[in-house]
Amino acid sequence: GENVEQHPSTLSVQEGDSAVIKCTYSDSASNYFPWYKQELGKRPQLIIDIRSNVGEKKDQRIAVTLNKTAKHFSLHITETQPEDSAVYFCAAGDNYGQNFVFGPGTRLSVLP
Amino acid sequence: EAQVTQNPRYLITVTGKKLTVTCSQNMNHEYMSWYRQDPGLGLRQIYYSMNVEVTDKGDVPEGYKVSRKEKRNFPLILESPSPNQTSLYFCASSQKPLAGTQFFGPGTRLTVL
């Protein structure tokens, strides 16, 4: 089955700096890679996703890159703000919801 | 308002006492899924359902049952709960399996003594 690793487990950045979180996956059949943000005590919410036919996707300050050959994908947050502080999860799966696996999460702290 | 609801939100029970956590969505979504969240392990998929009467095991199905008799409901059943099932549980739904955003319910915090 699919296995997703995520690094780092914790990340602290100064407000205004960039943050990068990296994930690797094992199953070459995976073709859907979402990122979720979970604030303390709340439910996960999708912030961006990418499919295997696209190498990069951007939405304002958030971007995701995918290297299918190397089986890794990354989340990039630019101009970080205190409200970006949360736990971020990557995930990998196929179009049918099978083998949909989350990474263990990265706790991002944006320091004022 | 489009939403996924779960009940109860908090539950403390004892080993062996059968319980059901309900999940309901009002978005006419085909795909529904249950996850458990444990510190350091992220979210692990327990069961998922592609449509009514279609369910399949996720990563950690042992000790759980589900049913999908109606499109909107996807209850999670613990026939004989054990302390290692103490966790935070999330239900999620999406229109197609992964064609769009998975909407998560608010979570159910379960403690099994």
Image: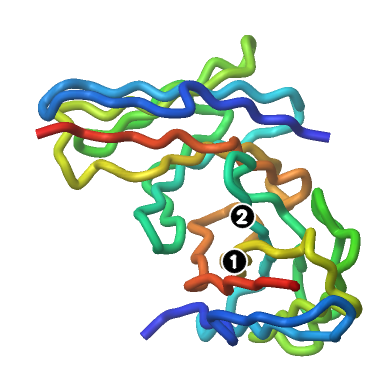
Q: Write the residue at 21% across / 34% down.
A: A110
Q: Which image quadrant: the N terminus of chain A? A: top right
**Where on the picture, by quarter, is residue B95?**
bottom right
Residue identifier under label 1: B90
Q: Is residue B35 above or below residue A73?
A: below
* Nearer to me, B86 or A31: B86
Q: Write the residue at 20% across / 37% down.
A: A60
Q: Are marks 1 and 2 in contact (CB under 8 Å)?
A: yes
Q: Write the residue at 58% across / 71% down.
A: B109
Residue positioned most to the front: B113
The x, y position of residue A3, in whole percent, is: 73, 30
Q: Earlier along the polypeptide chain: callout 1 or callout 2? A: 2
Is label 1 on the same chain as label 2?
yes
- Between disc 1 and disc 2, the foreground one is 2
Residue type (three-letter) at the residue carrying disc 2: Gln
Residue identifier under label 2: B37
The x, y position of residue B104, in whole percent, is: 51, 66
SS state under label 2: strand
Q: Write the residue at 84% across / 68% down.
A: B82
Q: Chain of mark 1?
A: B
- Left or right of B75: which side holds B88? left
- Left or right of A42: which side holds B18? right
- Left or right of B79: which side holds A25? left
The x, y position of residue A86, in whole percent, is: 34, 45
Q: Which image quadrant: the C terminus of chain A? A: top left
Q: How many marks?
A: 2
SS state under label 1: strand
Q: CA distance from mark 1 to mark 2?
A: 8 Å
Q: Chain of mark 2?
A: B
